[in-house]
Image (spheres, grey):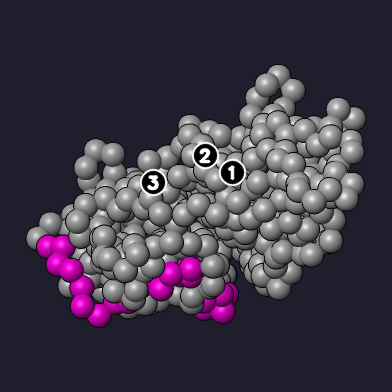
Amino acid sequence: MIDALYISESGLNAQETLINVISNNIANSNTLGFKKNRVDFIDLVYKSNDTNSIADSKDKNNLVGMGTGIGSTSKVFTPGEMKATNNPLDIAILGEGFLEVELEGNELAYTRAGRLMVDNDGFLRTANGHKLTSNIIVPSDVTNVLISPEGQVTGYVNLAEEPIQLGQIDVAKFSSVSNLTEIGTSLYKESNDSGAPIYGKPSDSGFGKIIQGHTEISNVSMIEEMVNLTLAQRGYQLNARILQVSDQMLETINNLRR
Amino acid sequence: MPKILDVLSNSITNDIQKLSNVSNNVANVNTTGFKSISLVEKTQNSSFDAPTLIQKIDFTNGNLTKTERPYDFAIQGNGFFVAESSNGELYLTRNGSFKLNSEGILTTSSGMTVLGESGPIEILESNITIDSSGSLFSNGRQINQLTIVEPDNLDSLSYKGSGLYSLGLGNDMSSNNTSSVLRGHLESSNISSSQQMIELIQLSRHMQSTQKAVQSYTNILDSGINKIGSQ
C-alpha cells in the first residue's frame, strides 16, 4: 500500500494526542497549583533506497519523511495567578521553589499547592493530607498563625503580646524543573534528569517568597488552549483529507485495467 | 513494444511519491520548526521517460507563536542554532524549544547540547536575560552567547530528521550578522495548507489522466491483437 496512508495515520494520531492534552489542561484549569502540559511534535524520517523516482546524483542523502510523532510531553512551569483567599493557612510561593512533603513509605514529593491545614495531632499538612517535612506543630491553643515571607511560622496564643515560634518552612528548587516526574494531585518527584533538590529559605536569592492568605491557581490560559484546539482540529481535518485522497488514488490504480 | 507502460507506471510511482510527501508535510503542520519539502521534477534530457524527482526544502521562516517559556527561542532571519550530539557531530536546527538538563546545561528537546560562543551554555540562575543577538547576561554581566550560524548556500544542507540539518562539506560555520533571537517564542511549521491542498488536487487529477492513458493504450493493443485481420 502507499506510504501516504500511514503518514496521514501518524498525523491523525498526533493531532488526537494534542486534543487530549488540551482537554486535560482545560479540565484542570481551576486545580490549585496545576501546571499545564504541552506537546512537542517531531517529524519521523527514514532513508530512501528507492533510486527510481527520487534520484539525486550529488552527495545528499534524500530522506523521505514518514509523518509525525510525539517528541515529548512536558510540563510548563510558568507561575500561575495568585488568588487572595484570606485563609491564614493558605500559602502561595511567589517565585521559584516547591514545598517538600512526605508520602506514605517515607518518600519525598514536592508541590506548589500550598493550601494547608492542621491535623488532629497538630501537624501542618497540605489539604490533600500530606505532611510537610518541616514538621511544624501548631498547638491547639494558638488562635492566630502568621507565616512570614521568609517561611517563619509563628503563632499567637489567645491575646498574648508575644508570638511563639512554631517552626520554619523551607523550599526546594531544582536545576531542571521540567524534568520532574509528575505523580498526580499536584505532586512532583525528583528524577534523574531534574537534579537533586536544592534547599533554601524562602526570600533568599534564587528562591521565591511565601505569601500567606493566597493560593496559586493553575497556569492554564484559556485563550492559548482555544487557539491550540483550533490548530489541532484543522490539522486533523487536513490529515483526514489526505487519507481520503489516498484512498481515491488507490481506487484509480485498482481500476487501471477493468 | 515501445515502453509506454513503463513510462506510465513511473509516472504513477512519481505521483505516489508526491502524495507521500504532501502527506508528510500535512502531518507535520504543528511540528515546531518544520520546513516544507517539495518534490520537483528534474529537467529532462531527451530520454523518453517520466522525470526523476528531486527534494527541495523550503526555508521560508514560519510564523512565531508566543509560548512564554523561559527556554523557548525563535530565530528571525536565516540563522540556525548549533547542536552537538553525544559523539561530537554538529547539527544545525531551527527548533528552539530548549530545556535544562540535570547539570543546568541548555539542551535541545532531544538532549543534544546547544553550543554557545564560549562552549556549552550553563544556566545556574533563573534570572538571566537574553538579548536579540543571543547574548546571555546574568546580573548584567555577559556569560555566554548562543551560536547562530547562517550558511551561505541553504541548498547544501542535508536533512537528518527531527529538525536537524548537517552542513555539506566545504561550508564553514561562520557566525551570522543578520538574524535575531526572540525569547519565549517558537517558530511554527511553514506549511501552507492551501498550497498542499492544491498539490493534492493536481496529483489526483494527474493520476486520473494517467489512468485514461493506460486504458487507451490497452484498447489500442486490444484492437491490434483481436481486431486486425479478423473476419
Checking the image for residue A199, the label placed there is 2
Image: magenta residue range: B171-198
Q: Position of residue B204 (x, y in %)?
A: 57, 70
Instruction: Give the residue type at disc 2.
Output: Tyr
Give the residue at x 25% y 80%.
B178
Checking the image for residue A7, the label placed there is none
From the viewer's side, name the closer residue of A34 and A13: A34
Q: Could you tell whether B49 is left or right of B206 in the image?
A: left
Residue A80 in sight in this render: yes
Q: Which residue is mark 1?
A: A171
Rendered image quadrant of residue B101: top left
Q: Which residue is mark 3?
A: B104
From the viewer's side, name the closer residue of B84 and A236: B84
Q: Answer with mark 1 or mark 2, whichever residue precedes in sequence.
A: 1
Q: Are marks 3 and 1 in contact (CB under 8 Å)?
A: no
Q: In the image, is residue B193 above or below residue B123?
A: below
Q: Are marks 1 and 2 in contact (CB under 8 Å)?
A: yes
Residue B39 in sight in this render: no
The answer as to whether the residues below labels 2 and 3 share one chain is no
Give the residue at x 48% y 34%.
A196
Q: Which chain contains the residue that carries disc 1?
A: A
